[in-house]
Image: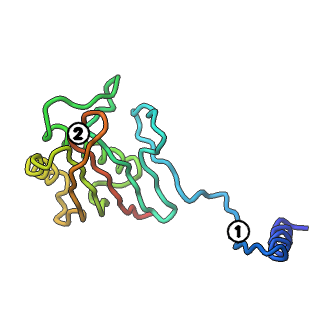
């Protein structure tokens, strides 16, 4: 028989054993595709830099002010303004690698090591979203890994 018939027979057998199973047809297309930024090294972390859903939703992991173009990747020197600019440049690189732009970003979560840096972060942030409709956003204070002063996670929608 066909694979569909075998799947239905397995489902019926499971129902007889008191197990309810909802089967959705298997697909060769995955629900998510990793976004790879050209020129960036493979990162040694247990998460993706970004994932694109089949529907075009872009999920960008928390980015810090790390310059990935210079070996070894490291936080940029300076302070909150420089780190915010590099963080957003990283987000922009991911959006471009996914086929989009900063105009496609719909929501950002900004984590600051110290809320006293909010005004300086906000000034740098504003220069990256210039289409007149900045993303929805929240800013929180948090302990950040690696000595970073800022980390930003974003979600966007890229038309297919």
Q: Position of residue 14 (x, y in %)?
A: 81, 71
First along the sequence among labels 2 and 1: 1
Q: Secondary structure at mark 2?
A: helix
User: Which residue appears at 81% of the width and 68% of the height?
Assistant: 7
Residue 78 position by quadrant: top left
Residue 13: percent from left, percent from top: 85, 72
Residue lying at 41% horizontally and 37% vertically, measured from the top left: 38
User: Is 105 on the left-hand or right-hand side of 78?
Assistant: right
Residue at the farthest top position: 71
Circle 1 is placed at which residue position? Answer: 25
Front residue of 150/82: it is 150
| Residue tagged 2 | 86
Residue drawn 29% across and 62% down? Answer: 107
Relative to 52, is 69 above or below?
A: above
Residue 62 lies left or right of residue 46; in this view the side is left
Q: Position of residue 1 (x, y in %)?
A: 91, 67
Q: Quadrant of the C terminus?
A: bottom left
């Amino acid at each position: 028989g066909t694979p569909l018939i075998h799947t239905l027979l397995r489902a019926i057998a499971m129902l007889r054993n008191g197990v309810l199973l909802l089967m959705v047809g298997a697909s060769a297309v995955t629900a998510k595709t990793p976004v790879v930024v050209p020129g960036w090294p493979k990162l040694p972390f247990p998460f993706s830099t970004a994932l694109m859903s089949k529907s075009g939703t872009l999920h960008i992991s928390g980015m810090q002010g790390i310059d990935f173009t210079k070996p070894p990747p490291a936080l940029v020197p300076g302070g909150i303004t420089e780190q915010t600019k590099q963080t957003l440049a990283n987000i922009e690189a991911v959006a471009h690698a996914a086929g989009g732009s900063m105009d496609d970003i719909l929501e950002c979560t900004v984590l600051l090591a110290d809320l006293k840096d909010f005004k300086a972060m906000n000034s740098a942030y504003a220069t990256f979203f210039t289409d007149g409709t900045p993303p929805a956003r929240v800013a929180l204070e948090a302990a950040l890994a690696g000595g970073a002063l800022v980390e930003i996670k974003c979600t966007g929608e890229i038309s297919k």
